[in-house]
Amino acid sequence: MAYAGHQFGYKVPQLGDGRAINIGTIDDYHLQLKGAGLTKYSRQGDGRAVLRSSIREYLMSEAMYGLGIPTTRALAIISSNHPIYREYKSERGAIVLRASKSWIRIGSFEYFSDNGGKDAVKKLADFVIDEDYKHLKGKESRYKDFYFELVDRSAKLVAQWQSIGFMHGVLNTDNTSAIGLTIDYGPYAFMDQFKKDNICNHTDREGRYSFENQPRVVQWNLKVLTNTLSCLVSQNELDEINNMFMFLYNKYYFENMASKLGIFDQEGTNINILIEDLLDILEYSRVDYTQFFYKISVYKNIDDILDIVLDRVAFAKWLNRYEDILENQSITKEQRQQRLRKINPKYVLKNYMIQEAIDKANHDDFSLVKDLMKIAQDPYAQHSELEKYASATPQDYSNQRLSCSS
């Protein structure tokens, strides 16, 4: 599949799937083999995938699905002893069978615009609408409505990323879905110690794709899409919709964060300030993001949480404000925590966990890959035999950066 894209903000007119091959469609899912060999768009590459990156995509796409976040899926993985050369060394190869409702991305529209103009863009837009926005088929305003729905879906998606602490790592326009999915897993990471400007991709020297910048860069990518759709919808109308992105994102984000704290009735509360103050404390205290919200879901007394916070005085003051708000909620503590345990996962797949599984798999031991898949598919369960993975990330492995070849 061909596409173009803006990579780190710079236009690349010819990209495309260099190691992913479309093999068919079943039940509205498009199937691909990733790492199966050369394609028309492999350029100087070999069309292969290494085992480490294949395991990462296989596990993380299912982990995101288990968390209820829109994503592509992974159906199967197979390893090989065929040598793959990356970063001056030989590695084991692998192929992932992956599936998605759509593999079309903003970069696809850029490519069609550059190589076919209005007619090509119209054909691609109709194809996407026919497949994934069926309720818009035949409407006179379908192209405008498609763009609005994509902006809304994308704002909702990034709000989910931010609230769960997920970093994509390389949000180029060719890695931004035309239907609002998490797509193309590379140097991703879940947040370890909370840090707003955390960068998980060591190639991203300027922090373009840092954690806190993800909403702005997705809006920027959607702005690029307006340049191709402007042959079908007026630029002013598209710009007005694009300008709504941050409003929609903030709405979804603070709703998600309020739910993570068990504040289901926000009337009369200044929830945004409460959340922003909490994030400042988490960052200053270097708190493990996932562990903190899980403890909020199950704590019996204040000491259960104070034990993981450095600035105990500031957090105790914040907790008093928080509990004052909770007293005005219409549910009991037991009811709230029961709901929270379905919102705040006990487990997310941290990079150090996946690396441990990769190391074992390189020695033909796939047991941890299978165990982590159990966590991925049900991150809210207890999984008592895997309890150690609910702990904070070990200091030596916290907030490490990975390469795009990951």
Image: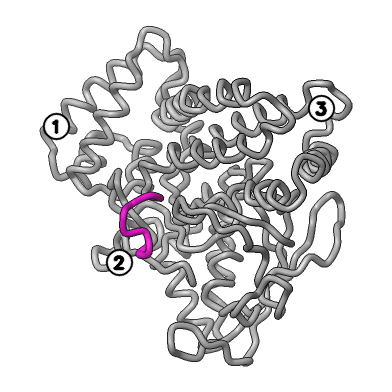
Q: Residue at x 29, y 29 (%)?
A: 276
Q: Amino acid at mark 2?
A: Tyr
Q: Quadrant of residue 352?
A: bottom left
Please name the residue that numbered disc 2 is placed on: 397
Q: Residue furthest toward the top?
A: 268
Q: Secondary structure at mark 2?
A: helix
Q: Tell me where residue 162 appears, x and y as whole percent.
A: 43, 40
- Residue 204 located within the stretch drawn in magenta: yes
Of circles 2 and 3, the one toward us is: 3
Q: Which residue is mark 1?
A: 314
Extent of the magenta region:
202-209
Q: Is residue 182 above or below residue 341?
A: below
Give the quadrant of residue 89: bottom left
Circle nearer the N terminus (2, 3): 3
Q: Alpha-carbon distance for marks 1 and 3?
A: 51 Å
Which residue: 60% across, 84% down?
93
Q: Is residue 95 above or below residue 4?
A: below
Where residue 23 appears, as percent x and y from the top left, is 83, 67
Can I make out residue 347 in this image?
Answer: no
Q: Residue 201's quadrant in the figure?
A: bottom left
Residue tagged 3: 136
Sequence-first tag of 2 and 1: 1
Q: Residue at x 63, y 82 (%)?
A: 46
Q: Nearer the viewer, mark 1 or mark 3?
A: 3
